[in-house]
Amino acid sequence: MRQPEDTLDIAVVIPVFNQLSYTVNCVESLNRNGIRDSQIVIVNNASTDGTVAFLASRPEIRALHNVANRGCGCAWNQGARAVTAKWTVVLNNDVILAPDAITALVRFAEEEKFDVVSPAMCEADLDYDFPAYAGEFVRVMSSVCRPGVAIGACFMVRRRVFDAIGLFDDDPRLGGYEDDEFFRRAERAGLRMAITGRAFLHHFGSVTQKSIVASRRQPDGKIGDREYYRKKTGQTWPRRKWRQLRIGLREQWWKTTERLRYGHTLREKRLAGRWHYC
C-alpha cells in the first residue's frame, strides 16, 4: 500500500539567491507533491529581489536569512541543522517536480536500502509537455537505477549519513564543488547512492549559480577554485585521470544501454527543441 505523503518523515532544504519566480514554481511543485510548507526550509543568501516578501507571505515555511551570500555549502548546513527528519531533500530552487516524485524517492530508498538518492531529470529548456512526459517517463523507467552516483540539483539524504560523515564542507573556495565533495565522502564511507527512474524532475540549469557568477562579474564563469578543490580532495593527476576514465566509460554504458532498451536515459537535456541523452 502506498504511504500517504503526509506521513513521510521528510524535510526539504532550498538555498536561494534571487530568482524568485523559480523559487515560487519550485515550492508550488513541492506542495503538489504533498510536501507542506512546514516541511520546507528556505535559506535566503541575501537576495535583493522579492524573496524576503514572498517568504513573509508564507509564514509556515522556515526561512533563514543571511545578511551576505554565504554560499551553497553553508546554506545546506544551515538547513540540515534546522531539521530532524529522517530524510532531508537538498534541492535547487530552479527545479519543478513531477507528481509523486518525493514519495517515489522515499519508497525507492527504503525498499532498496539506499542512503543518498536522486531522481531522474531533464535539464535546460522546458518546451515540452512536462506532466505528460514525466508520467510516460516514470512508467517506462521506474525499474532503472544508476548505482553509486547522485545529482547535486536534487538529492535526498538519510539522516544517519550526516551522523556518519558529517555535514557539507562549507569552505567558500569549494563553491560549485560542494556536492561532489560530499558524494566522494559518502562513497569512501561505503554508503549507498543511486539515481532512480521512479522519480522525475525538470532542472532549468544552475540558475542560482549563474546569478552568483553574474553578480560577482567573474570573467571565467566560475565560483570555486578548482585547483584548490583538487588539492584538498587528494586528486593527483593520475588519480583524476583514472577516475575520469572509469566514470566516462560507466556513463557511456548507462546512456547506451538505457536508450537502446527504453528510449530514454536517466539524465536528459532539452536544447533548441531536441532531446539529448546523458
Image (spheres, rainbow, N blue to C red):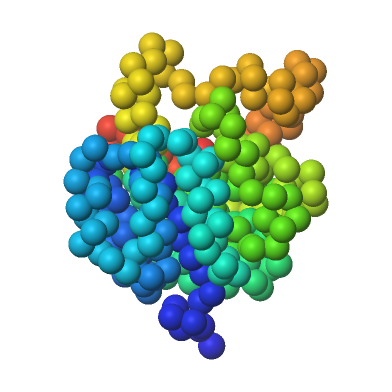
The residue at the point 36 percent across, 48 percent down is 65
**Number of numbered discs overlaid on the protein picture:** 0
As drawn, is 201 to the left or to the right of 31? right
The residue at the point 42 percent across, 68 percent down is 39
As drawn, is 91 to the left or to the right of 245? left
Residue 96 image-quadrant placement: bottom left
* Residue found at the very far bottom of the displayed protein: 1
As drawn, is 201 to the left or to the right of 106? left
Name the foreground residue: 66 vs 40: 66
The residue at the point 59 percent across, 32 percent down is 171
As drawn, is 172 to the left or to the right of 57? right
* 168 relative to 120, above or below: above
* 25 relative to 71, above or below: below
Residue 163 lies, in percent from the top left, at 72, 58
Residue 62 lies, in percent from the top left, at 38, 62
The residue at the point 43 percent across, 13 percent down is 220
* 210 relative to 61, above or below: above
Residue 174 image-quadrant placement: top right
Residue 156 lies, in percent from the top left, at 56, 58
Using the rendered image of the protein, determine whether residue 232 is visible from the camera's viewpoint: yes
Name the foreground residue: 69 vs 168: 69
Residue 76 lies, in percent from the top left, at 51, 48
Residue 63 image-quadrant placement: bottom left
